[in-house]
Structure formats: structure tokens, C-alpha cells
């Protein structure tokens, strides 16, 4: 063997094997957070003959696992949004009450507050400044006048409700894609058994 042929053989041995082209089992989606739409395979026998049972099965299973991961993420986001909505509503109601009392004759608010577990104390809170402090997160509190606070909280409530609705829609869409992919996997598996 000549030196050139040895080098060519060594390069071929160390060259990476080309990755197999992805099988078109999904299509891009411009809606639903760009979650790919699963393609329903009409002619399973033709697909198995064209792409091979093992490659087809592996890529479908990989896509199904990605769908399951996305589902877990969306479920957590939905739970987080459902937890935030009541808190935003209570805060909005409280700021509206403070504004109402401030606009009236009462410049103090009587309240009970939690000192520790099962221990409450009565307090009179002065309400003569026309301002309220809102926690923005990350241990940051900002002082707003009542009108600005109500505007901000109303906007936050609207955004949270929209995001919750979008997340629920995305979850429904994702479940449809998972069902389609599970049906495809079962049909490819059955075709592979029939071919053997």
C-alpha cells in the first residue's frame, strides 16, 4: 500500500460519519410557541420502506420525548400563573380600598395583621399620603400613587390572564401532537412486526 493510499484510508477512518437527514415527521408551526406540528403518516408501509423502521421509530420517539418535556414546562407555567392571579386580584382590591378610604374622610385604616402562626394583632395604618408600596419581585419595592398602582396592577392582571389562556391553548395543542405521534409510533411498530 502506498503512502498516499494509507493517508486516504486513515482520513476515511477518522472522518465523522455523516448524520442521517431528519425524517419529515413534523412541520414548523408559527403559532403555539412554535411547537412543531406532528405529521400524521397515512401510508405507513411506504414510510417504513423509504426511511427504515428503526430510524423512523427512533426519530418519532425522540420527538415524543421533546413533546413530553414541553408539556412539563407548560404545566409548571400554568400552575405558576394560577397561583399569581389570586394574589394580583387581592392586591388590586386592597389598593382600590385604600384609595376609596383616602378619597373619603377616613385617613386611617383599621386592620388585623399576622404576627406569627395563629397570632394576629390589631393596627391602625395611616392612609394620608396617597401612596402605596408594591413589591415588584427580587426584594424590590416601589412606591406608587394610588392611580399608578391601580393602572399597573390592572395591566399585570390582564397580562397574567392572557398568558394563562395562551398556556392552556398551547397545552391542548401539544396534547393533540403527542396523541398523533403516539399513534404514528404504534402504526410504525405494527408495520415493522408485519414486515418481519
Image (spheres, rainbow, N blue to C red):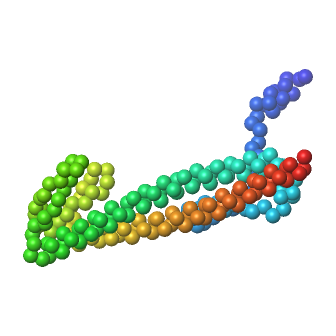
Q: On the picture, is 89 further left or further right than 24?
A: left
Q: On the picture, is 21 further left or further right than 97?
A: right
Give residue 102's position: percent from left, percent from top: 14, 72
Q: Give the quadrant of residue 71.
A: bottom right
Res 26 seen here: no
Res 137 seen here: yes
Between 90 and 129, the one lying in front of the other is 90
Q: Give the quadrant of residue 67.
A: bottom right
Residue lying at the far front of the rendered structure: 118
Give residue 76's position: percent from left, percent from top: 48, 54
- Quadrant holding the N terminus: top right
Tell me the residue at 18%/53% (across/down).
Answer: 120
Tell me the residue at 90%/46% (across/down).
Answer: 196
Q: Give the quadrant of residue 129.
A: bottom left
Give residue 115's position: percent from left, percent from top: 19, 50
Please count the marks in the image: 0
Q: On the picture, is 101 further left or further right than 35?
A: left
Between 143 and 163, the one lying in front of the other is 163
Q: Is residue 18 above or below residue 24?
A: above
Q: Is residue 151 above or below residue 66?
A: below
Tell me the residue at 20%/53% (across/down).
Answer: 114
Tell me the residue at 42%/68% (across/down).
Answer: 161
Give residue 144's position: percent from left, percent from top: 22, 65
Q: Is residue 145 above or below residue 117?
A: below
Amino acid at each position: 500500500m502506498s503512502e498516499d493510499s494509507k493517508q486516504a484510508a486513515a482520513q476515511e477512518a477518522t472522518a465523522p460519519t455523516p448524520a442521517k437527514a431528519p425524517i419529515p415527521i413534523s412541520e414548523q408551526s408559527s403559532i403555539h410557541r412554535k411547537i412543531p406540528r406532528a405529521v400524521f403518516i397515512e401510508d405507513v408501509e411506504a414510510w417504513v420502506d423509504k426511511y427504515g423502521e428503526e430510524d423512523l421509530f427512533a426519530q418519532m420517539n425522540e420527538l415524543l420525548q421533546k413533546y413530553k418535556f414541553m408539556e412539563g414546562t407548560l404545566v409548571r407555567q400554568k400552575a405558576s400563573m394560577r397561583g399569581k392571579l389570586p394574589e394580583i386580584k387581592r392586591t388590586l382590591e386592597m389598593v382600590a380600598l385604600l384609595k376609596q378610604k383616602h378619597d373619603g374622610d377616613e385617613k386611617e385604616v383599621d386592620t388585623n395583621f399576622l404576627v406569627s402562626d395563629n397570632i394576629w394583632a390589631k393596627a391602625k395604618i395611616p392612609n394620608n399620603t396617597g401612596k402605596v408600596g408594591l413589591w415588584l419581585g427580587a426584594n424590590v419595592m416601589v412606591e406608587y400613587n394610588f392611580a399608578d398602582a391601580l393602572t399597573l396592577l390592572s395591566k399585570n392582571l390582564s397580562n397574567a390572564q392572557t398568558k394563562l389562556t395562551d398556556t392552556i391553548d398551547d397545552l391542548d395543542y401539544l396534547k393533540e401532537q403527542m396523541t398523533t405521534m403516539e399513534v404514528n409510533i404504534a402504526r410504525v411498530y405494527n408495520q415493522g412486526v408485519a414486515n418481519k
